[in-house]
Image (spheres, rainbow, N blue to C red):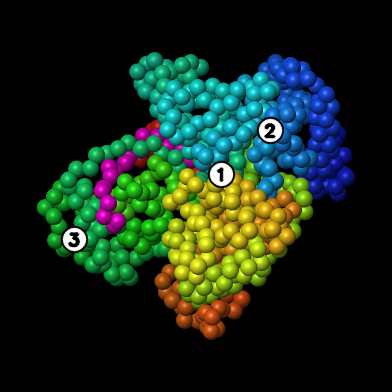
Amino acid sequence: MIGDASSRLFHLIKTGFRPNSARLSRWRGMAGDIVRMSQDFRSLGENELVRRGLDIRWRAKAGIPLVKIMPEAYALVIEASRRTTGLIHYPVQVVGAIGLFEGGIAEMQTGEGKTLTATLPTFLFALQGAGCHVVTVNDYLAERDCEKMAPIYRLLGLTVGCIQTPMTPPQRKEAYKQDITYATAKELGFDFLRDRLKRGGAERKGQLKLGDAAADEVEGIVQRGTHFALIDEADSILIDEARTPLIIALNQPNDSATVNLYRWTDRAIQSLTLGSDFLYEPDKRQAFLTDAGCRKILLMGKPSLLDSIDTERIYKQIEQSLVARYGFHKDRDYVIAENKEITIVDESTGRMMEGRRWQDGLHQAIEAKEMVPITASTGQAARITVQSYFREYKYLAGMTGTAYQVRRELNRVYGLKVTVIPTHRDCIRRPIPSRVFKTLDAKNRAVAESIQKAREQGRSVLVGTPSVEKSELLGAVLKELGIPHHILNAKYHAQEAEIVAQAGQAQKVTIATNMAGRGTDIILDEIVKKSGGLHVIATEMHSSKRIDRQLIGRAARQGDPGTYQFFLSLEDELLRCLSPRSRQRAMRMAIADANGELSGRWLRYFQRTQRFLERMHGKQRRDVLKREQYRTEYSNKMGMDPFLEMTD
């Protein structure tokens, strides 16, 4: 049998007892057999291919282990893909798919065809009829991938559905009934919580007992279990989003006193002095009133409506207003939508997070700061962390271009092993030495010069920025110099795929926040290929080296030529996690040349700061998981639902 114990031992010995190399060696051998089997299927008529698909489905439902039918299933998908989409799986894609079947994370570089790779394990696990979820980072990619890959599954007798944000519960239930369902992690997690709330209501009414097999028949339940999930951009979902739990909120209408509290605290903090009245920790985004600050707040004149609010609550809201003022910035952490609502921007992707809100009065503090209408504060009806939600699945796998750096965390938290899959063609991406500047203005001038030089060579340029504000600031510099460009940021979410798809044309300049447009290929035209390929400019280091790698990975896909270069400054957002005193000291020590450029030795200053942030964010994820585990253990002992009880 393919993949049995003797085969594993053979490849382990063959590779000198190196587990990763042994896995890849074994998977290559299996992939070769599968590709040859798929070529044999080319002689089958369409009716015969459909019959083979139905036959393999009955075998899976009859209880035959999936490992025994995996080679034939994969071969059928390869042939179905060739007939319906014209796309043929490369051997390295089959290697990645075998890794996904064995329950791991396949690190596949940008442009290696992860969407097509996903069809193989998705089809295999869907054969059991228990439901299969393909998880993407946004609604657009879920809909696009569903439409593009659905003909493959349908030819082999499977049904496909897609969850989109505006859907009603009956529409969602119908989509979840399909053999394969495409959706975002956010939609899956919130549907899971809403179903728990409905089950909990039925239990309280005596209609259902905890764990009752008839739970799915409760009115309004949309999901049918957590069997298998395949996560695209797995590091973004399993790591970057793991610091923020999914919460279903209960609106708590604001009374006049509460609205006055938010408005008054925003005005009051302007008379407080940093260091004497309050302390601010930029790395943690936390503010604390000192004794002197508390006394000053206590003695301040207040609207009569605040007499009904206790002092502790006033102090807490003052601290939230300070965090809003010093830690959250417009066009970086949030944007103001046309309807005057505050919309959060995901720091790791640059995308708008519709429907998400900050808790504990922070969202209202930012609304007061921006002088927009104050929305109702929220309590918690149900909550779950990303870690806990995806550990609910019986089988879990994922794909991404940047997982190796967090392989230990993925293994510890989710039990997933990371394997780096070789590229279909050799990567010829070339780095250009990083440049460091004292000021943002000096850096932007140098970036503009580099862009103009690349355009003169006939190349295309992709510029990565960390925020909406910085993308538009750089855009203004390019506009002043007469350099045509497109800006892709959280304000233009709907057009991002179209803009990114055109970013490989000669002399095209695209400015993108972080990884806006992630999941859309940049196809180079022939002029660009002959001129040196796509040139990626990273205008800052991000809070994680993985996010930098995601941007860099845009260049030199599928054996294309390409280069990348970092431009940094001492006014970069990365350094905002440091204290004002540390930043001021660095500015005094920095000796720039006539163009405002610093010695290359300053690069280490940024690398140390990035490592500090990576460690801090890792600790935050561990703390979130520990709190969730404690809540779960306590709730189980008390006979309560851990996702519904004790949420505040």
Part of the protein shown in magenta: 368-385
434 with respect to 483 (left or right):
right
Position above or below: 408 against 173: below
- Residue located beneath label 1 in the image: 238
The mark lying in front, picked from 1 and 3, is 1
Badge 3 density bin: few <14, some 14–19, many ≥20, Cα 10 Å: few
Label drawn at residue 23: none
Callout count: 3
Report x, y in % for residue 569: 51, 71
Q: Which residue is mark 3?
A: 298
In screen coordinates, is 243 left or right of 532? left
Give the mark toward the camera: 1 or 2.
2
Q: Are marks 2 and 3 in contact (CB under 8 Å)?
A: no
Residue linked to disc 2: 85
Visible residue check, residue 598: yes
Q: Amino acid at mark 2?
A: Thr
Name the residue located 41 percent from the left edge and 43 percent from the top edge. 354
Mark 1 and mark 2 lie on one chain; the one further toward the N terminus is: 2
- Which x, y percent locates residue 355? 39, 41
Image quarter (top left, top right, bottom left or bottom right) of the N terminus: top right
Q: Residue furthest left?
A: 304
For label 1, the SS is helix
Residue at image point 85% right, 47% down: 15
Q: CA distance from mark 2 to mark 3?
A: 69 Å
Above or below 522: residue 75:
above
Secondary structure at numbered mark 2 = loop
Q: Earlier in the sequence, mark 2 or mark 3?
A: 2
In this view, 238 is above or below 396? below
Q: CA gap, disc 1 to disc 3?
A: 44 Å
